[in-house]
Image (tube, rainbow, N blue to C red):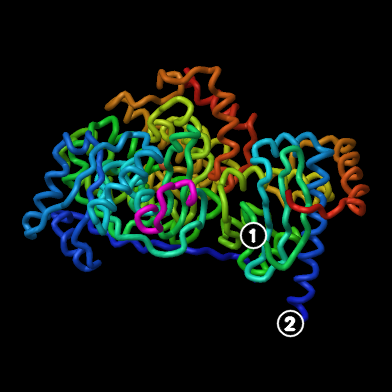
Amino acid sequence: MSIKSKLQRAYVSLMMRIVGRGLAIASRVDSDTAYELQHLPAEMTVAMRVYPNGPCCLLQHTGTDLSYLGVRDSCDADMEIIFKHLQHAWLLYTFQEDTPTAFARNRIVLDGEVHHATVFNRCLSRLMILILPRLLAKRAVKRYPVIALRDKFSLASAIYLRMPFERTRAAL
Amino acid sequence: MTSRYYEFYCPVKILAGLKALEHLPAELAERDCAAPMVLTDKGVREAGLIKHVEIAFEEAGLSIGPVFDDIPPDSSTDVVESIAREFRERDCDSLIAVGGGSVLDTAKAVNILVSEGGEFLRAYVGAHKLTRPLKPLVAIATTAGTGSEVTTVAVIKDTHKQKKDAFQSSHLMPAVAVIDPRMTLTVPPVITAATAMDALTHAVEAFTCIAKNPLSDAYASAAIKKIVTALPLVLAEPGHTDARLDLAEAATMAGIAFSNSMVGLVHAIGHSLGAVCHLHHGTCMSLLLPYVLEYNFDAIQDDLGALLPLLAGDKAARATPPEERARASIAAIRDLRDEIFDATQLPRSLSEAGKVEKSQLAKIADLSVDDGALMFNPVEADRSDILNILEKAWSLPN
Ligand SMILES: [Fe+2]
């Protein structure tokens, strides 16, 4: 592996830890995320994975919230969003490309049910909108919504402040 | 460096034109198959269309084997599972599907079970669950519209959960698609119009949504031109064989286009509208298309403008200033819709359809946001945006 790939892998894996923990926290502190999650079956596992050897971020819907199960080299989940190459995950996590575009350009494949992926994508977009500065978030989602700065700030700080304490939980 | 990238895939062998059906025995022999099972529905059988297939096989000294003609318009996992059992009992080795979308989807789903094994479809729900080629499936479309003969998707109702399951895999594509003008000749004008509008929507969405690519664009634009030219001819003269063939070819081309570039918001809403109100898919497409194009307008203006010569003719396009072409394209689609209404009374609005209650619109919007097609729409749409579009599509402006 080249140094560039090693660095990209380290960055992607760090971002996956942030996004994974962020989603888990958002599922508890943000009512919009919680509302979306009702549409996923309880105990369903969800992964964002780079083909073929990871990193892979694994989450589980407990029925009430999302559990962050950690970032690993490999995983097997009920629904997987698979980046066909590390470079594609890099594009996404450096906010050069949003998820729909990555799907449209065949850089990501879905292993699982499509409507679960649409729900998960809405949670992911919502997280980006909450935790990223507006300029970055605009590049990470299709449409940046009208959101009161005060709401954004209080939710973002709730998510960031809890992040260091968010445990990696065991699967149900 | 450009970040452009796309994939394009269509491994389906297409037999199109005069006596296309007569080539089927040779196509099966080439795939080492001698015992096909024919799947169809009662309507197709009563219209005498299976006869054409039977004769094609008799002339080659063969018989077509078991015919299952009881596929309902809204096929289900129970139907699929019982056909798969019969397929195994009768030692069949291939499938011939003769019909519209439901028959083709059923055949694809049956093919999963008889090729992959297992009694129940449940194990294969979703995308990319199939890992090897399936048995040869021949698709003979009798309605020119769905494009299912060249797509990777099958949608089947789960009998027990009362919801629709989608199956997606490149292995679901038929081995052979037959476009024979005899097979669409008897379709009533209103169904011809609805299915043609479905095909037009596939092409327009393929051309304007975010997964478009140069190859899908080529198929989409050729399909649009053919539909716009041939549909009025068929409506004026239903026995116009050449125009019928044009429509069927266009539906297949539009199918190839959207199978590679996906569809967008018209389909996301249309799927939900069809599911909630039991409205024909083509009707849903026809009455939603102009409103969704208006919703997407800012993002698709250039693409839409580029379609004007195909939708309204070169002369009209040249006479329209570039900045007005996108609007003119939508107007041309509305004109086509109105022309179809005059000829067939195909509904132009939700209220005209007569099957939709205003109280159902919220439910339709709720379902639409979970539809996979939304991902590929160039403009984001949430529940309230979709509700807005539905309100606009409710009745025609005076
Ligand atoms: Fe369609």
Work out how far the residue at label 1 is from the one at label 2, CA to CA, in angstroms.
Answer: 27 Å
Left or right: residue B22 compared with residue B249: left
Chain ID at mark 2: A
- Residue bearing the label numbered 2: A2
Same chain under badges 1 and 2? The reply is yes
- Mark 2 burial class by Cα count in 10 Å: few <14, some 14-19, many 20+: few
Circle 1 residue = A76
Q: Is residue B54 above or below residue B366?
A: below
Residue sitting farthest toward the bottom: A2
Task: Give the residues in magenta.
Answer: B113-124
Amino acid identity at mark 1: Asp
Q: Is mark 1 within 8 Å of ligand 1?
A: no
**Residue A13: quadrant of the picture:** bottom right
Task: Name the residue type under label 2.
Answer: Ser
Query: Does dot 2 land on a helix, a strand or a loop?
Result: loop
**Image location (x, y in percent) of residue A114:** 56, 47
Q: Is mark 2 within 8 Å of ligand 1?
A: no
Tell me which secondary structure the magenta stretch mostly adopts: helix
Q: Where is residue B170 in the image (x, y as percent from the top left)?
A: 43, 59
